[in-house]
Image (cartoon, rainbow, N blue to C red):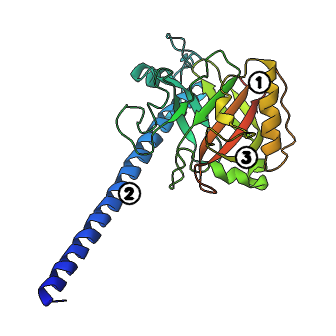
Amino acid sequence: MTQRRRRLLLTLLWAVALLSGSLVMGDVLRAGREERANRQLAEQVQGRRAQRSTPELPGGPRAEGEERPPKYAVSGVLYQYDPLWQQNPDLAGWLTIDGTQLDNPVMFTPDDPEYYLRRGVDREYARSGSLFVSEGCTEQGNHVLIYGHNMRNGTMFGELDAYQSQEYAQAHPLIRFDTLREERVYQVLAVFRSRVYWQEERGVFRYYQYADLSSRESFEEYVAQVKRAALFDTGVEAAYGDELLTLSTCSYHTQNGRFVLVAVRLRDGGG
């Protein structure tokens, strides 16, 4: 190789390295911006929730005669979520797991179910996207299936696969999913690994096709399949008439892998 070709090759390698580095740095900066934006939303909701649940305001005691805010805003939406819903009526609710980073809005666009796959609540491009409700779910239904990205920095559903550990599941058994009008608490029923199956595959559990569990047959079939696939027994049961919550994210145990958590709404603590 001539000296001139060697110099050209070195220049090309440096250019590739610089480009790769700039792309990685861009991803890091973008992830940081998205994480901060989501944290700010969570802080706003937490602040408004605190105004209702504590006798004192964050900045000090209430003024004499000052009343706590009402549970519902004039719109009929829960007080803590009303400002965000006013900004974006695609808001369907809010998902929280205490002791984790998961404290995020959940979006729903039934006419375009994956609209928020790579969009933030402001509808602008976001690599981490937003949590969103699956097609086939309805506000009046007994099952909510929510998708979210498994982000390396732990945001969105980036910590969900920690539930593969039975000890972790026992330490984090409760999940709050509030709709716009109800405060709800669920208990973990089961967790399992799955994948997106090819159309020709038979005898497999396509959990993502069970958004509608309104019939007893579909509900009992879904719960039986979930229990059969479960990584461990949580001791929690579900019967027709209960309301279920399913959280789904990517998993890397196999090609097109998925990690899934199913929870059942508590009858005496769900808002």
Q: Amino acid at mark 2?
A: Val
Disc 3, SS: strand
The tag earlier along the polypeptide, 2 or 3, is 2
> In the displayed structure, would residue 164 be above or below residue 111?
below
For residue 35, above or below residue 121: below
**Residue tagged by mark 1?**
218
Local crowd size for mark 2, using a 10 Å CA cut-off: few (<14), some (14–19), many (≥20): few
To which residue does mark 3 refer? 192
Q: Nearer the viewer, residue 29 or 213?
A: 213
Is residue 242 among what the camera can see? no
Can you give x and y, in whole percent of width and height, for residue 21 in the image?
31, 66
Closer to the eye: label 1 or 2: 1
- The amino acid type found where label 3 is placed reads Phe
Q: CA distance from mark 1 to mark 2?
A: 43 Å
**Could you tell which of marks 1 and 2 lies nearer the N-terminus?**
2
Task: Name the residue type under label 1.
Answer: Ser
Give the CA separation, mark 3 to mark 1: 19 Å
Q: Which residue is found at the position 79% from the left and 37% from the top?
A: 225
Which numbered circle lies on residue 28? 2
Which one is closest to the eye, mark 2 or mark 3? 3
Q: Is residue 237 above or below residue 100?
A: above
**Residue at left 78%, top 38%?**
226
Q: Secondary structure at mark 1?
A: helix
Asked whether, in this view, residue 226 is left or right of residue 47, the answer is right
